[in-house]
Amino acid sequence: MIPGKLSVIIPFAQEHPQIAFTVQSIFAELRDLCDFEIIVIDNHCDELQTQLDKKNEPRDRGGEYMKSLAGGSRPWLKYLAYDKKLSHWNAKNLGVENSDGEFLWFVDSHCVLSRFSLFNMFSYYKNHHKELNGTLHMPIAYMLERPGVELIYKLVTDPERGVVHYSFTRFRPSDKPYQVPCMSTCGMMMSREIYDKLGGWPSEMGIYGGGEHFINFTMATLGMTINIFPSWPLYHYAAPRGYHWNYDDYHRNRCIATYMFGGDAWAHKYIMNIKPHGEKHNDYKMSILSTVLASKDCIRQREHIKKQQVKSIGSWLQEQMIVLPNDLIDLTPVE
């Protein structure tokens, strides 16, 4: 680990040419201002290729293009490939494993920065991360959106169904960073120390869903904070990517995240209350739960997190003025 260095982590799949504009935007922002590296992780894999073949769509040039640029006269740019499965979260893990910086910034591969937003955010976080005891996040907006409609997340819960979730709400301008219950992991800055406490994203996670639930609500049980940096937004370009998520994988990811921050009881309540899908019923739901609870990696990471928790997810929700059902009331902080 190199103290004071920023490692920018960007997973991508079927995002050409957006990935090039994202990398250029970040390089233009940081060059000559700080010690940094940009790590791009190509997530093309058999699962993705199968989806493209079914729609008779070709693989794009993104991986080939970024690989040709990395290294050499661009020592600040690293190219990696994660081809085990279609997993945004595991691609990020690989990026962190191959990074050098004390600080990490995660961004999607279809984003453009507002001027000075990242450098100012990094300067602040580098000097204040200990007192923040958590992550720092940029507000987000969609490309060419008019000012005044920047977005952050708000907490959305349904404890009767085991749901700890989020949705968009308006960004609140401020002259200093402020705490929120949850926020997007695109535009998220964290120290390597926090990443290690979490253990990275769970290795069992697939492409979509669960990753942000894991970060936000696991951190809550560890007594850490989510903070908004009041900058101009990080702009997203919402173009079709040629691949898709699926229902089973989405709820399995959400079940994994819920298990990580809430243990068996919350994971069981969550998965048993997902909406029926076709003919799928309780046996199907239990099969998802059983694969999660039987995973050695999930068990190992849950134990790693449980040892560090200072409060239960139920206690944290009650701090947010959320009323819990009787079977999930737990006011006793985790020892």
Image: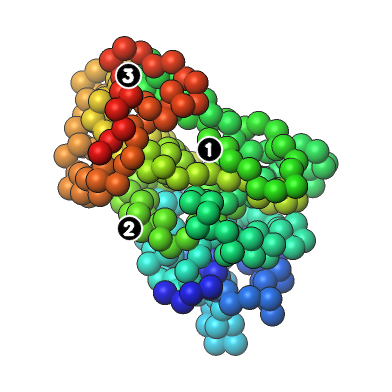
The residue under label 1 is: 182
Quadrant showing the C terminus: top left
- Picture quadrant of residue 126: bottom right
What amino acid does circle 2 point to? Answer: Lys
Instruction: From the viewer's perspective, tell me whether residue 7 is left or right of residue 1.
Output: right
Q: Measuring from the top left, give residue 101's x and y in whole percent.
A: 48, 71
Q: Do tag 1 and tag 3 residues touch (Cβ < 8 Å)?
A: no
How crowded is the residue under tag 2: few (<14 C-alpha within 10 Å), some, or many (20+)? few
The answer to whether 328 is drawn above or below residue 185 in the figure is: above
The residue under label 3 is: 329
Q: Residue at x 43, y 23 (%)?
A: 318
The answer to whether 155 is drawn above or below residue 86 in the figure is: above
Q: Measuring from the top left, give residue 32's x and y in whole percent.
A: 69, 80
Of badges 1 and 3, nearer the viewer stands 3
Q: Secondary structure at mark 3?
A: loop
How crowded is the residue under tag 3: few (<14 C-alpha within 10 Å), some, or many (20+)? some
The residue under label 2 is: 84
Instruction: From the viewer's perspective, tell me whether residue 43 is left or right of residue 280.
Output: right
Q: Earlier in the sequence, mark 2 or mark 3?
A: 2
Instruction: From the viewer's perspective, tell me whether residue 40 is left or right of residue 26.
Output: left
Q: Measuring from the top left, give residue 80's x and y in whole percent.
A: 44, 70
- Picture quadrant of residue 247: top left
Quadrant showing the N terminus: bottom left
Q: Secondary structure at mark 1?
A: loop
Q: Secondary structure at mark 2?
A: loop
The answer to whether 187 is drawn above or below residue 40 in the figure is: above
What amino acid does circle 3 point to? Answer: Ile
What amino acid does circle 1 point to? Answer: Cys
The answer to whether 63 is drawn above or below residue 279 in the figure is: below
